[in-house]
Image (tube, rainbow, N blue to C red):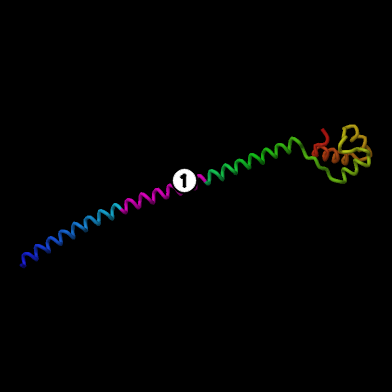
């Protein structure tokens, strides 16, 4: 009877050892699966970040291109506004902004000093009203 108990105990210990081995193997597989899943999640998050950054970069580049196009269009068309005092001064001399000609401007500015004439012509050039 004692031998039977030892044999049963030995069989139980062997079974427990086998079960422990199987549990260790299962734990290793779970750890590997977890590492793989974490790696995939990290890769997914990184690719989403890259996509977001690329989209933001593309939007910024488009905005820069638009602003550059607007700036070059403004440079070519010129400024179309003048100070009210300048418009009044020219109107008193009979020159309207619709019909500015170099000769009319020179005649209208004849009573001004050279510095004032240069200032007026400079404003007209910047406004794009005098070619």
Q: Residue at x 18, y 59 (%)?
A: 17
Nearer the observer, 110 or 18 = 18
Q: Position of residue 130 (x, y in %)?
A: 83, 35
The quarter of the displayed image where residue 101 is located: top right
Nearer the observer, 45 or 72 = 45
The quarter of the displayed image where residue 90 is located: top right
Tell me which segment is drawn in magenta.
30-51
Question: Seen in the image, is 90 located left or right of residue 31?
Answer: right
Does residue 33 lie above or below 121 as drawn?
below
Q: Residue at x 5, y 67 (%)?
A: 1
The secondary structure that most of the magenta stretch takes on is: helix
Q: Residue at x 49, y 45 (%)?
A: 50
- How many numbered circles does the render carry? 1
**If the image is split into quadrants, where does the C terminus sit?**
top right
Q: Residue at x 21, y 58 (%)?
A: 19
Q: Position of residue 126 (x, y in %)?
A: 79, 39
Question: Seen in the image, is 14 located left or right of residue 108?
Answer: left
> Residue at label 1?
47
Q: Secondary structure at mark 1?
A: helix
Residue 52: within the magenta?
no
Label 1: few (<14), some or many (≥20) within 10 Å? few
Residue 33: within the magenta?
yes
Residue extending farthest bottom: 2
The quarter of the displayed image where residue 6 is located: bottom left
Q: Position of residue 22 (x, y in %)?
A: 23, 55
Q: Position of residue 127 (x, y in %)?
A: 80, 39
């Amino acid at each position: 009877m004692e031998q039977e108990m030892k044999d049963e105990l030995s069989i139980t210990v062997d079974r427990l050892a086998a079960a422990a081995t199987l549990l260790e193997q299962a734990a290793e597989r779970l750890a590997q699966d977890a590492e793989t899943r974490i790696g995939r999640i990290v890769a997914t998050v990184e690719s989403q970040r890259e996509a977001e950054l690329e989209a933001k970069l593309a939007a910024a580049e488009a905005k820069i291109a638009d602003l550059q196009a607007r700036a070059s269009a403004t440079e070519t068309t010129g400024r179309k506004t003048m100070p009210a005092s300048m418009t009044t001064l020219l109107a008193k001399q009979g020159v309207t902004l619709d019909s500015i000609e170099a000769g009319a401007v020179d005649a209208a500015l004849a009573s001004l000093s050279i510095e004032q004439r240069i200032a007026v012509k400079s404003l007209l050039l910047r406004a794009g009203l005098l070619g």
